[in-house]
Amino acid sequence: MTDPAWINTALSSARPQAVAALLRYFRNLDTAEEAFQEACLRALRSWPEKGPPRDPAAWLIFVGRNSGIDAARRQSKQAPLPAEELVSDLEDAEANIAERLDGQHYRDDILRLLFICCHPDLPATQQVALALRIVSGLSVKQIARAFLVGESAMEQRITRAKARIANADVPFEAPGPVERSERVAAVLAMVYLVFNEGYSAGATEIANRAPLCEEAIRLARLLLRLFQTEPEVMGLTALLLLQHARAAARFDANGELVLMDDQDRSLWNKALIDEGLALIDKAMRHRRSGPYQIQAAIAALHARAARPEDTDWAEIDLLYSVLESMTPSPVVTLNRAVAFAKLRGPEAALKLIEPLAPKLSGYFHFFGVRGGLLMQLGRSDEAREAFDRAIALANTAAEAAHIRMHLDRLSAPSPVVKANAKAPSRQLQ
């Protein structure tokens, strides 16, 4: 295959392995990235004419390494490497390096690269931006557009992140078992952050930010290939697939948010759902539950329900109680309140979330859920006050518009309104 589309896919797929190996060799992010870019340019010149190599990643690593050495020699005014046509004849060299680059080698290199992007000295926004630039290869323009900031601001953010990494004296040796476990947890959190950056986008931003969901899924699948028996990696991948499967149904034609109970389930992506369900079932068989697995199991129960009324709310409530014990959080309790209301009514759910008010005083979803519960109870004035607060805290125009819809209903209360009122929880979007 020598067509441009195949070559572009091959280069993108090989990027994590190649950049990670070059980073191990040069111990500098900028040098590794520049060496990879030079190798890609040579691939674009060589592969259409000579055909693709047997192992694109090994080819790119070998050419990138030689390119980096060549650049260093030029800078130090030493003798240059042989001419390109000699360096590009990689048949034997490629075979040798491919033999050395086995699965374990790739595993350590990629994990190291991802963990470096997740260095604790970096703020979360810099971690995500650096990972998207270095690991995923997105352009600064693409990342800036996704984060709704200017290109120069994003360029500075990434430059500062690289400088912090350089000054932190990060070790480049392969991590041991304990460090590896810690690094996987950090990387999973980073991938989840990338996904949420796309998932939380409003309808007007979805074209620019939805690709972040797809990139997070790609990274999760990459981790799954590296850690095939790690149930939390399966759990995170399943969670992202099941959440993203609803993308086509989450907004209506006017760009307004559609809660899960009101979504057209025929628009849900069955292939993604089937993949996610198979993964979470496999993860649960390991009997080593973790937060991502529990969240994926909740998403799976929603996905398995052919109709909203078929949802197993009792099991969802049970899973949320398990998640609360694993990772105590007012947000987890808030999400549980939606299931609680389905099982025990809005009054019980309201009592569950009232103690959360001090901690969630600046959280849009708290006031949205509270307003929905109050509306179901016929306490219109209190519901209106909660909805007004939710609008003030809305993160997107779609969130604000959804709350205004409830306010419009309150202006003409009726038994129908009371029966149909729903709490606008993020978990149900």
Image (spheres, rainbow, N blue to C red):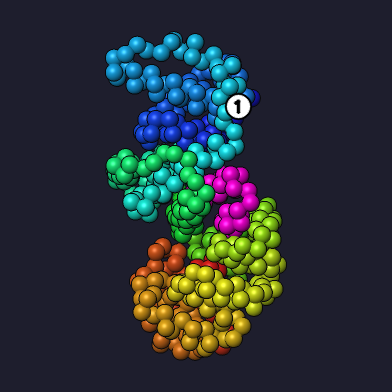
| Residue 34 position within the rendered picture, expressed as x and y whole percent measured from the top left | 39, 29
User: Which residue matches tag 1?
Assistant: 99
Identify the residue at horizontal 55%, vertical 18% (top origin). Answer: 93
Q: Quadrant of residue 267?
A: bottom right
Q: Is residue 214 visible?
A: no
Instruction: Quadrant for the N terminus, please.
Output: top right
- In the image, residue 267 above or below residue 111: below
| Residue 95 position within the rendered picture, expressed as x and y whole percent measured from the top left | 60, 21
Q: 10 Å neighbourhood of mark 1: few (<14), some, or many (≥20)?
A: few
Q: How many marks?
A: 1
Question: What secondary structure is found at the residue carrying circle 1?
Answer: helix
Q: Name the side, left or right, on which 409 lies relative to 263.
A: left
Q: Quadrant of residue 158?
A: top left
State the predominant SS element of the stretch in magenta. Answer: helix
Identify the residue at horizontal 32%, vertical 17% (top origin). Answer: 74
Identify the residue at horizontal 61%, vertical 19% (top origin). Answer: 51
Q: Which residues are magenta?
A: 212-240
Magenta region includes residue 316: no
Front in this rendered view, residue 160 or 405: 160
Instruction: Quadrant for the C terminus, please.
Output: bottom right
| Residue 266 position within the rendered picture, expressed as x and y whole percent measured from the top left | 67, 60
Q: Amino acid at mark 1?
A: Glu
Q: Is residue 182 visible?
A: yes
| Residue 167 position within the rendered picture, expressed as x and y whole percent measured from the top left | 29, 42
Identify the residue at horizontal 38%, vertical 82% (top origin). Answer: 385
Front in this rendered view, residue 107 or 314: 107
Q: Name the side, left or right, on which 150 lies relative to 113.
A: left
- In the image, residue 98 above or below residue 320: above
Magenta region includes residue 230: yes
